[in-house]
Image: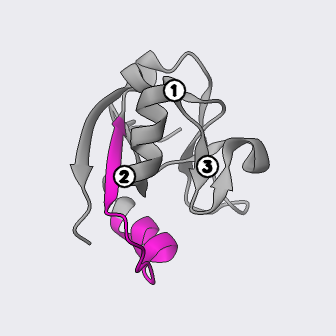
Amino acid sequence: MPDNEPTTVLHITERTLWDAARERGAYEWSTRGRTLQEEGFIHCSTRTQLPRVAAFLYGSYDGPDELVVLEVDPGRLGVPLKYEAPQPGGEEFPHIYGPIPVDAVVGVETWAG
């Protein structure tokens, strides 16, 4: 976990997925095209990491749906949040190990890229 842990973590997704989660009460997509069940956790980022993560995941995105950034309050999750590196010694990214309750999302902004 970073020394200067942010008060929120971010997750970029398609608006229709977020809208569906709001109806169900929880968000369960890990990353573009992969569910929480398939991946085992939900990929997130810090504000600083977001532009790189968005470019990597959605740089070629030309879908009909707009992209949104979910701002998640870790204190409202009720499931583990871990900062982990994809490879040893690499940059750590926040991973949420369970569904995100909709009330843990404290902000939603449109991603303009």
The question of residue 33 being in magenta is answered with no
Identify residue type, mark 3. Answer: Ser
The stretch in magenta equals 51-71
Q: Position of residue 21 (x, y in %)?
A: 48, 35
Vertical arrangement, residue 19 with respect to residue 80, above or below: below
Q: Could you tell which of marks 1 and 2 lies nearer the N-terminus?
A: 2
Which residue is identified by label 1?
24
- Mark 2, secondary structure of its residue: helix
Disc 3 crowd, CA 10 A, few/some/many (<14, 14-19, 20+): many
Q: Tell me the distance, in whole angstroms, between the alpha carbons under discs 3 and 2.
A: 14 Å
The answer to which of 43 and 108 lies nearer the viewer is 108
- Mark 3, secondary structure of its residue: strand
Q: Could you tell which of marks 3 and 2 lies nearer the N-terminus?
A: 2
Q: Residue at x 45, y 66 (%)?
A: 53
Q: Could you tell which of marks 3 and 1 lies nearer the N-terminus?
A: 1
Q: Residue at x 44, y 28 (%)?
A: 23
Q: Position of residue 113 (x, y in %)?
A: 26, 72
Which residue is identified by label 3?
30
Vertical arrangement, residue 1 with respect to residue 65, above or below: above
Disc 1 crowd, CA 10 A, few/some/many (<14, 14-19, 20+): few
Which residue is identified by label 2?
15
Instruction: State which mark lies toward you, 3 or 2.
Output: 2
Identify residue type, mark 1. Answer: Arg
The question of residue 63 being in magenta is answered with yes
